[in-house]
Amino acid sequence: MADPMMAAEFMGPESMLFVFLSVGAIAVFSMISVASWSEARRKEREAYYRAEMMKKVAESPQPGAVAAVEYLREQQRIASERARQGLRIGGVITTATGIGVMIFLRELLGPNEGVFFCGLIPLFVGLALYGSSYMVTAGAD
């Protein structure tokens, strides 16, 4: 039989913290995998129902086919606008992060250290994202 003192020795605060973090990590990644799977299923169902609807509308007389084409164009325009807005939001957030990193490193290490220029990397990435929302997607209109 195991000695109770020996069992208590193995279950110290460090061991309990390790067990807690391990179980927490497994739970979080399990939840993420189920969420991504359900999102993929939802998108698949939406695409299937959209295709079925478009097939039925296209098989209808002439006014239905025109309406189907207009619907497809509107869906494409909405998707393009969402992508453009996503690039803009991502650019603004990344630019603000770069400015924040520069300020933080300058205050932390002082102005004599040139390390704060590392914040220029996310700053320029953010500006590129924001600029590309105007240049790249401009041809879609």
Image (cartoon, rainbow, N blue to C red):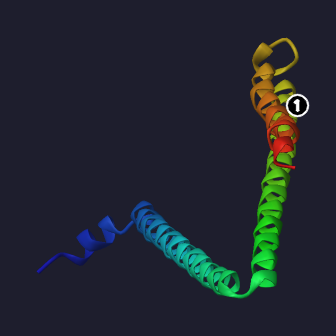
Q: Residue at x 80, y 53 (%)?
A: 86
Judged from this view, the residue extending furthest toward the top is 112
For this rendering, which residue is in front, 25 or 33? Answer: 33
Q: Is residue 11 above or below residue 121?
A: below
* Count of numbered badges drawn on the protein: 1
Q: Residue at x 61, y 84 (%)?
A: 49
Q: Three-letter amino acid code at disc 1?
A: Ile
Residue linked to disc 1: 103
Q: Is residue 110 above or below residue 35?
A: above
For this rendering, which residue is in front, 40 or 109? Answer: 40
Write down the quadrant of residue 74 in the picture.
Answer: bottom right
Image location (x, y in percent) of residue 62: 77, 81
Q: Residue at x 82, y 34 (%)?
A: 98
Residue 104 in sight: no
Residue 3 in sight: yes
Image location (x, y in percent) of residue 70: 82, 71
Q: Is residue 92 left or right of residue 42?
A: right
Quadrant where the N terminus lies? bottom left
Q: Is residue 39 left or right of residue 4?
A: right
For this rendering, which residue is in front, 6 or 68? Answer: 68
Image location (x, y in percent) of residue 137: 81, 44
Write down the quadrant of residue 43 in the picture.
Answer: bottom right
Q: Residue at x 87, y 34 (%)?
A: 99
Image location (x, y in percent) of residue 53: 66, 85
